[in-house]
Amino acid sequence: MTASRLATGGSAIDRSRPIRFSFDGASVGGFAGDTIASALLANDVAIVGRSFKYHRPRGIWGAGVEEPNALVDIGGPQATPNTRATTEPARDGLVAKSVNATPNAQADRNAFLDRFSRFIPAAFYYKTFMWPDWHMFEPRIRAMAGLGKVDTHWTSPGTADQINHYCDVLVVGAGPAGLAAARLAAGAGLCVTLVDDQHKPGGSLGHRACEIGGKPASMWIEETVAELTAGGHLILPATTAFGIYDHNLVGLNQRHFDGRRDTLWRVRPRHIVLATGAIERPLPFANNDLPGILSADAALAYLRRHAVLVGRRVVVATNNDSAYGVAAALAEAGADATLVDIRRDGMPNATAKARLVKGRALAAAKGRLRVEGVTLDDGTRLDADCVLVSGGWTPTIHLFGQAKGKLAWSEARAAFLPGDPVDGISVAGAAAGSVSLSEVFASSEKAVASHGKTKAALPLSTGPEATGGIVAAWPVPGSKGRIWIDYQNDVTVKDVELAARENFVSVEHLKRYTTLGMATDQGKTSNLPGLALMAGITGRAVPEVGTTTYRPPFTPVPLASFAGARAGELMAPVRRLPLESVHRESGAVFQEYGGWLRPAHYGGRGVDADRAIQDEALRARRSVALFDGSTLGKIEVIGPKAAEFVDFLYYNTMSTLKPGRCRYGFMLSENGVVFDDGVLVRLDEHRFVVSCSSSHVAAVHARLEEWRQDRFGRDAVYIHNATSEMATLTVSGPNAHKLLETVDLGLSLDDADLPHMAIGHGFYGGDAVRIARVSFTGDRSYEISIRADRAEPLWAHLRQVGQAFDAVVIGLEALMILRAEKGFIVIGKDTDGTTLPHDLGSEGPRVKRQTEYVGRRSLFTEEASRGDRLQLVGLTVPSGEAPLPTGAHGIKREGDRLHSQGFVTSSYHSPTLGRPIALGLIERGAARHGETIEIQHLGKVRTAMITAPCAFDPAGERLHA
Amino acid sequence: MQLFPCPFCGPRDETEFHYGGDAGNARPDGAEVPIERWAGYLYLRGNPKGTAREIWVHTSCGEFFVMERDTVTHKVLSSTAFGGEHAA
């Protein structure tokens, strides 16, 4: 190949703006408007990459998204691996590198692999690397696999925008069919969005000469764009419609080329017109992958758009009419062109400037690193520095297929065309099998017709019309030489034959066994030849073999587009306490607990966290502790049937609760499993507050709503989640009462007025406060709830008066120790998805309750009544030992075998007791207090004694101390 | 992404909804419900191919409703609030 830039012409390039970039370390010159591929061709760079498996030298094949060979890694600030050189604009200073080649594409160290190709056919590694162990080979093979390299020093240039968009008609593709459809739809008063992956609208009109309405096509394009723009319609160039999803949601990825990340568009059109064109197929002949063998249409595109003549001595091999115009154009531009057509008759008139060889096909391409000539099937040899091939056209029906559109085989076009229509989607132009411009425009009119009467005139093709004559030339079994089907994944005719021999004849099996169509180009040029070959091998017709499933994306989409702003802290935002900044000033170290960012302890960073936590827990028992419990769920249940409602929702009878009092209880799931626990407050006759686990509020709220709407009705109860409205500050410990007496809260704190499990109402600084005497520590406790935005002065006040009592501010970790000392459970930690309320020692309601409640029937199954259920216990280890590992299993021995008999759920060192404490779920545990069992963790066995869950103040005297 | 019509809020993305089970899966009350009946209520689902009547909740507004849809074509046939006062 001796490709060169012509002195004049090139509709896409701006010769006044020369640019320079580097490819594999060499400087390459071009013009603004060049793609990397067109600039490389203009500089006669033949080898641009190496193939995936055999490291064969590869050149540019196409001029668009179908490109299987010319992948490059783009370096620099917008580094992107595996970019198609045919669609990437060449920019000044850009650094591009070939993929899968060391050190570069021209001289690849792994090129020797090609000589071993007959030992490494499709699926060889499934058979070869079985013995002794795949993992022995894996690192080496992984290192060799893959194409481009990720730049690990890459930093994100920001987040991608995401736009939700709506329109009446979305037209995909701005070629003649799409432009006509957009104009006709606009003329019908519809709001149109037109997208195209090219920089400029026009599609094939940019390189296939035509005349519309007596004028050159370029004028019609400009006129159409101007009209659409003036009408307020949206035209998005450099934007790929990569997927059609459920209910015709269309995903678009828009490129910017100005340093910004791509933009993701989610479009909900009323109607979609697919005018996505068609992709040219290769022809099968030996060594058809050599550099210098291009798609004929691509060569024409490079000539017209970039003024690049791809060769001097050009053989144009074809089985259809479309290559005739290419041969004529290249001959016109000065190339020596020979047309080789497999047909003997029925073809269009060839240009006088090109030789025509009728009734012959290419048998092989000659050359080592680039094509030097061809041999015809009669043995004739032709010299050539470039071979252009056209094996026919595959309509781009990917989006139609994604929308579950059925395809129909057309023998006349040797292609699959869109079959039965899909709701809301029509297909126009070459994608629908149209060939001549008149047919294309007629298909556009049909696609838009059902949406309204258009005032726009149908464009008229006034020039010579293209014809679609074709005789299929599929790869056939038993061919001589190595004939490539899938260039990118190195799948040859022999590989497909091998798959057939081993009975991988289904098209989906063929794909996975040989990797045909599984490369980054997703088989845009290879799928149809591959399945046609399989049809030939198995004696079936092409439509009997069928196609693989079409799935998004049509071309690769950066993950950043899908992520949008959902990165970093916004990936999974945490909920924050109203007093967070105050806690930070106090040295709080924050951790995420069930979606909330909460102080773990107040020891500050860099200190021994365990010591800080032990110290907090110890001091809490000694005098008084302050704790921010604002995350505790506070869901109000209000209404005439509120009491009946909470009775049904709770395992415990709640309707007998007196106003102003609290009761602890369980909520079950319908399968009987304990779903949540907490204290229910009855504010008055028809008003309750459900306190639920901090991390469980949304789930409990949803469950209350479900039962309200499904069983009780909207008028019976009203549910309001007030969790974030109120901050809850807890004062707990032997001196809690004394401390609070020094703060004027406007109510009596005497035990007669505010006993344990009661609530009181008061005021602080003019704001109403609710004080609940409930305890999660086992000590006398007051939970003070106040408007979240007024909590700060109260918290400061409590801390200030606390100094006189040596009050300690405790984090969640210390609270966990305090509650474990008391045997108080945390749902989901001390219970699992099988724990029933009687496993936790709460047998009463199960035995006594006569009224209905959620999960009731499940408590009386055979499973629920088993004698060997896991039950909540305390576990004590000999003094001086370390705490048991959480998750360690209680074991029993049967001969040599170990069986689990439960596990440790919570385990801490108790500073107050001066020894480890633990909770666990142990088989028949409630009846085994005093028994010693073996506990195993990671092969190490220890002993522990089963006790009651409560290890501290079992009589509960401290609640009233 | 599917569009589901909330009877109160109109068409919204499917990500705003949670599935709530088969419609018409009536809860049998009482501790003496035959265990087969209870197991059916808890676990047995029709999983129909074609038209399905299902409970969904629109998490943005919190309302539960009945939606009829085709499990093959994903076409939404109707959506009705509990009590039938709103339909979309």
Image (cartoon, coloured by chain):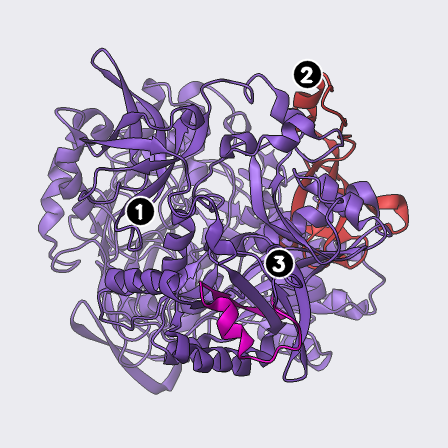
**What residue span does the magenta drawing correspond to?**
A724-749
Q: Quadrant of the N terminus of chain A?
A: bottom left
Q: Residues within 10 Å of mark 2 (few under 14, many from 20)?
A: few
Is A5 placed left or right of A568 in the picture? left
Labels 3 and 1 in the same subunit? yes
Q: CA distance from mark 3 to mark 2?
A: 47 Å
Which label number is shown at residue A201? none
| Residue A679 image point, x, y percent | 61, 51
Say which chain tag 3 marks.
A
Please, what is the three-letter code of the amino acid marked with disc 1?
Gln
Q: Is residue A435 visible?
A: no
Which label number is shown at residue A755? 3
Q: Residues within 10 Å of mark 3 (few under 14, many from 20)?
A: some
**For mark 1, what is the residue?**
A488
Residue beneath the point at 12% across and 54% down: A108
Q: Residues within 10 Å of mark 1 (few under 14, many from 20)?
A: many
Mark before the other along the chain sequence, 3 or 1: 1
Disc number lying in front (3 or 1): 3
Q: Is residue A99 above or below residue A899?
A: below
Q: Count the marks: how many? A: 3
Say which chain tag 2 marks.
B
Q: Is residue A732 located in the magenta-colored stretch of the structure?
A: yes
Say which chain tag 1 marks.
A
Q: Classify mark 1: helix, strand or loop.
A: loop
**For mark 2, what is the residue?**
B36
Q: Colour of chain A?
A: purple
Q: CA distance from mark 3 to mark 1?
A: 78 Å
**Between residues A507 and A741, which one lies in front from this camera angle?**
A741
Chain letter, red in picture: B
Residue beneath the point at 67% across and 63% down: A753
Q: Classify mark 2: helix, strand or loop.
A: helix
